[in-house]
Image: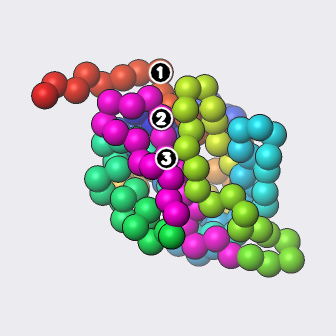
């Protein structure tokens, strides 16, 4: 599972994926913090982070649009794949970090630089975390696991 935790205590877990973007589907502005103390200010149509079970839906759709996507996780793997959707380059925003893998305790840290960012899981927009300017959100592998029965 994938987990998102906001700095005000709001939390969410999802089986497939978590989406972070502007509530009105405009460009979302944020600072993306990556493992290894790398970061980049970005403007995009959102960030998608998901599990191996999500790698058969929305994630694989985004991965197919990339020339060199990372290997998507399998259903039982404890890692996530993440993508920035339609990153927009400008003098103030970059597009260097637009995809990757999170394993173990690694986290994406998203700091809102616009109002009305939403975070929802598995396509359920009504059950959302709402972020305002300056709030931080961490996304990573959830400690809870589902048991896959084959």
Q: Is residue 138 magenta?
A: no
**In the drawing, what numbered circle is on residue 79?**
2
The residue lying toward the viewer, choosing from 108 and 74, is 74
Q: Is residue 87 magenta?
A: yes
- In the image, residue 21 sits, relative to residue 13, either above or below, namely below
Q: Main secondary structure of the magenta part?
A: loop
Residue 19's spot in the image, x, y percent? 49, 54
Instruction: Name the N-terminal-most of marks 1 and 3.
Output: 3
Secondary element type, mark 3: strand
**In the drawing, what numbered circle is on residue 143?**
1
Contact flag, marks 2 and 1 (Cβ < 8 Å): no
Magenta residue span:
68-88
Residue 126's spot in the image, x, y percent? 39, 53
Looking at the rendered structure, the number of numbered marks drawn on it comes to 3
Contact flag, marks 1 and 3 (Cβ < 8 Å): no
Secondary element type, mark 1: loop
Q: Report which residue position mark 3 lands on.
A: 81
């Amino acid at each position: 599972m994938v987990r998102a935790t906001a700095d005000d205590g709001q939390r969410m877990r999802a089986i497939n994926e978590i989406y972070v973007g502007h509530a009105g589907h405009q460009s979302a502005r944020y600072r993306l913090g990556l493992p290894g103390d790398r970061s980049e200010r970005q403007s995009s149509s959102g960030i998608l982070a998901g599990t191996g079970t999500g790698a058969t839906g929305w994630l694989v759709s985004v991965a197919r649009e990339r020339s060199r996507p990372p290997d998507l996780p399998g259903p039982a793997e404890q890692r996530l794949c993440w993508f920035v959707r339609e990153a927009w380059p400008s003098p103030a925003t970059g597009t260097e970090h637009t995809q990757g893998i999170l394993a173990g305790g690694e986290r994406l840290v998203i700091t809102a630089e616009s109002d009305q960012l939403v975070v929802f899981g598995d396509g359920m927009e009504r059950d959302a975390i709402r972020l305002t300017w300056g709030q931080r959100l961490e996304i990573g592998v959830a400690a809870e696991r589902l048991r896959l029965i084959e």
